[in-house]
Amino acid sequence: MESPPIDISNPAVRDYMALVRLQVLTPLSLLINIATVMVCAVMVDPSLRRIAELYPSSISPHPRLIGIYIIAIYLFQIGYCVLLVIARKPETKRTLVRGVGLPLVVANWIMAGWAIAWVMQWFLTSTILLGLLLVLLLYANVVLLIYHAPTRERPLDVALIHAPMRLFLILPLEVLFPYSLFITLGLTWSPGEPQHYARGQWAGFGVVLGVNLLGLVVIVLRHDIVWCVAASWLCASIWSLKPKPFPVFVSLTISKPLSFSTPGLHRLAFRSPL
């Protein structure tokens, strides 16, 4: 048998082939993600929004604000796909291949599967998928921060690699996974019965406070302006949908300005890539 025309044992060749695979698989997975979510949001009855209205809870977010956030993730991912094609710096290519790689592709497929499970009201499946999504994105973000840290010398890497991955991670961490878990555990009430809205209030208080304290630690240690803005937006999305139990309302009210009032954040954010 003849040897292959290229030496696939060469690390540079393997990285090039991995980049080519990502140039094909990433846009395809993003297209599947967008198409599935759009169909489930617009063409299916009950839609994604209608399911959320049928299962109000103490941490239910405002669907419109979540929709805007998801659109922002898609726009950043489109920029990421463009960067996959136009990247020329070796450091950027290594970040794309070894820092993000296939986890983002798999994450987009999982997001599409979650949309289907949600409209089918398979809430246990939805929670499992969101848990897998959270673990996958957490892994990718940790790899990025440890081995491919953001730097001001490559602003496109910060804007189109680190920012999309961080935005994608915070969505299931702060909203989707806890909310789906609440529905699975029965911590909801029937629409039109706000007198029961205190159900699960202390669980909601713990989730909101715990997630935002984690975000505060990240913001303080990393001076992460992306996390700061994203977490504040998602807090506002939960806070804006009424009614809310008093403990949850208090934790949200504190959490919204907490990130922005962190001492020195405004001064340090401009010295940090994120």
Image (cartoon, grey):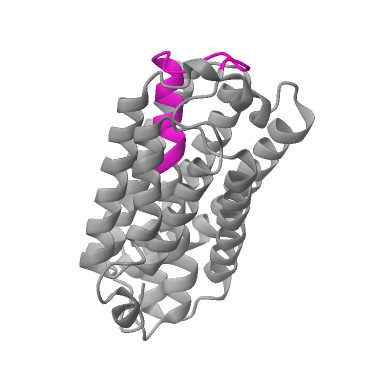
Looking at the image, residue 271 sits to the left or right of residue 48; the answer is left
Report the quarter where the C terminus lies.
bottom left
Estimate the x, y position of residue 170 in percent, counting from the top left. Answer: 41, 49
The answer to whether residue 182 is magenta is yes
Residue occupying image coordinates x 53% and y 38% = 61
In this rendering, the answer to whether 46 lies above or below 253 is: above
Residue occupying image coordinates x 71% and y 39% = 38
In this rendering, the answer to whether 49 lies above or below 104 is: above
Viewer-side residue, 75 vs 190:
190
The answer to whether residue 159 is magenta is no
In this rendering, the answer to whether 241 lies above or below 256 is: above
Residue occupying image coordinates x 46% and y 35% = 176
Q: Is residue 95 visible?
A: yes
Viewer-side residue, 185 vs 125:
185
Estimate the x, y position of residue 178 in percent, counting from the top left. Answer: 39, 31
Look at the image and give the residue range highlighted in magenta. Answer: 173-193
Viewer-side residue, 154 vs 267:
267
